Image (tube, rainbow, N blue to C red):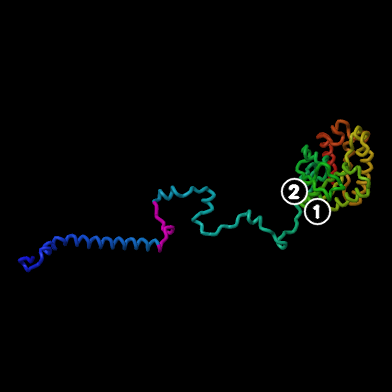
């Protein structure tokens, strides 16, 4: 059916009514396109700048709460004012190996060059067995160094690691090489060698010990002490550790010391009684002097400084 205004169909009459719907569809399409562009933009940003590289600024309060507190040492070591590089620590310098060309010449210590003071043992080194060790344990010899141990004997001086050092157990000969320079070296050995069958072997090893001392302590005066006596009770009851045997060894020790240019000290005479034995009250076991007799021993050493 045609209309009166030109013969158009009636359904065309409602075309103007559909225009708002068309406008909405256009707007929706534009909005959807914008959204797609926004999504593509975000994806592009993420591709160029990964999330880990993006740092969000925080407020000063947040920064102070997030940072760990530093110690005083950390603050001083990371001082922002100083731009100069840090110097190596002294510990690192000390641990640096020294080449042979850098090693300083051996210089005698003050104790090796200063005059000897009577009663002062700070410049002395003592080598011996448990009897010598007693001087250290009782504290009657102040300031001295000791290479001593129970059971120390001349015939094992170069083979038995019986001296404790900073690097572990060592023989007396090895420990000597680790000692600083001393003014005096006192040696008393022999009580543990009395059963040795060969006197020649004993004196030969003792002589080698003196050579080792002289090599490592060239400025020291070497004092070779006699073997101390034992009590009469001990001497009468022991076929080996007795005063007759001790006297026999002392004769050879004195001869050997004089041949080597060492000073021989008859310490036994300072402690023995009229019978040539260690007094009964001087040692509970008849062998090792108590503190009072160790003091007498020390007084003899003080009075016989060369």
Residue drawn at 89 percent across, 38 percent down:
229
Q: Return the x and y of residue 149 as percentages of the image width and height.
A: 80, 43
Location of residue 230 (image quadrant): top right
**In the displayed structure, does residue 67 sit left or right of residue 136?**
left
Q: Earlier in the sequence, mark 1 or mark 2?
A: 2
Please say if 68 is above or below 106. above
Q: Which residues are magenta?
A: 47-58
Given residues 40 and 254, the one toward you in this image is 40
Residue denoted by label 1? 216
* Camera-side mark, 1 or 2: 2
Please say if 208 is above or below 143. below
Residue drawn at 76 percent across, 41 percent down:
142
Please say if 239 is above or below 171. above
**In the displayed structure, does residue 207 sit left or right of residue 59?**
right
Given residues 168 and 254, the one toward you in this image is 168
Please say if 178 is above or below 192. below
Q: Secondary structure at mark 1?
A: helix
Q: Return the x and y of residue 133 as percentages of the image width and height.
A: 80, 41
Count residues near mark 1 (Cα–Cα under 10 Å), then give few for <14, some for 14-19, many for 20+: some
Count residues near mark 2 (Cα–Cα under 10 Å), then give few for <14, some for 14-19, many for 20+: few
Q: Secondary structure at mark 2?
A: strand
Residue drawn at 52 percent across, 54 percent down:
78
Location of residue 98 (image quadrant): bottom right
Residue denoted by label 2? 168
Q: Residue furthest left?
A: 4
């Amino acid at each position: 059916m045609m209309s009166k205004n030109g013969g158009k169909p009636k359904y065309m009459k409602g075309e103007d009514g559909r225009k708002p719907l068309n406008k909405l569809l256009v707007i929706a399409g534009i909005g959807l396109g914008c959204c797609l562009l926004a999504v593509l933009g975000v994806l592009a940003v993420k591709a160029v700048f990964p999330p880990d590289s993006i740092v969000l600024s925080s407020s000063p309060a947040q920064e102070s709460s997030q940072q760990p507190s530093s110690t005083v040492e950390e603050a001083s070591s990371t001082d922002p004012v100083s731009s100069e590089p840090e110097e190596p620590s002294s510990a690192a310098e000390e641990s640096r190996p020294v080449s042979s060309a850098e090693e300083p010449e051996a210089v005698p210590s003050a104790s090796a060059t200063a005059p000897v003071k009577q009663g002062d043992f700070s410049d002395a080194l003592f080598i011996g067995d448990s009897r010598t060790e007693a001087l250290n344990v009782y504290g009657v010899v102040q300031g001295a160094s000791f290479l001593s141990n129970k059971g120390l004997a001349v015939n094992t001086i170069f083979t038995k690691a019986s001296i404790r050092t900073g690097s572990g157990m060592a023989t007396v000969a090895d420990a000597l090489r680790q000692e600083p320079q001393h003014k005096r070296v006192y040696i008393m050995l022999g009580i543990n060698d009395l059963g040795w069958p060969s006197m020649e072997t004993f004196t030969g090893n003792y002589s080698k010990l003196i050579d080792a001392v002289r090599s490592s302590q060239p400025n020291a005066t070497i004092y070779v002490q006699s073997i101390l006596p034992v009590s009469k009770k001990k001497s009468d009851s022991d076929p080996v550790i007795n005063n007759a045997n001790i006297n026999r060894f002392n004769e050879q020790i004195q001869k050997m010391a004089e041949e080597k240019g060492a000073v021989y000290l008859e310490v036994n005479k300072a402690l023995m009684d009229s019978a040539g034995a260690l007094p009964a009250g001087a040692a509970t076991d008849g062998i090792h002097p108590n503190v009072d007799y160790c003091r007498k021993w020390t007084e003899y050493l003080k009075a016989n400084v060369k």
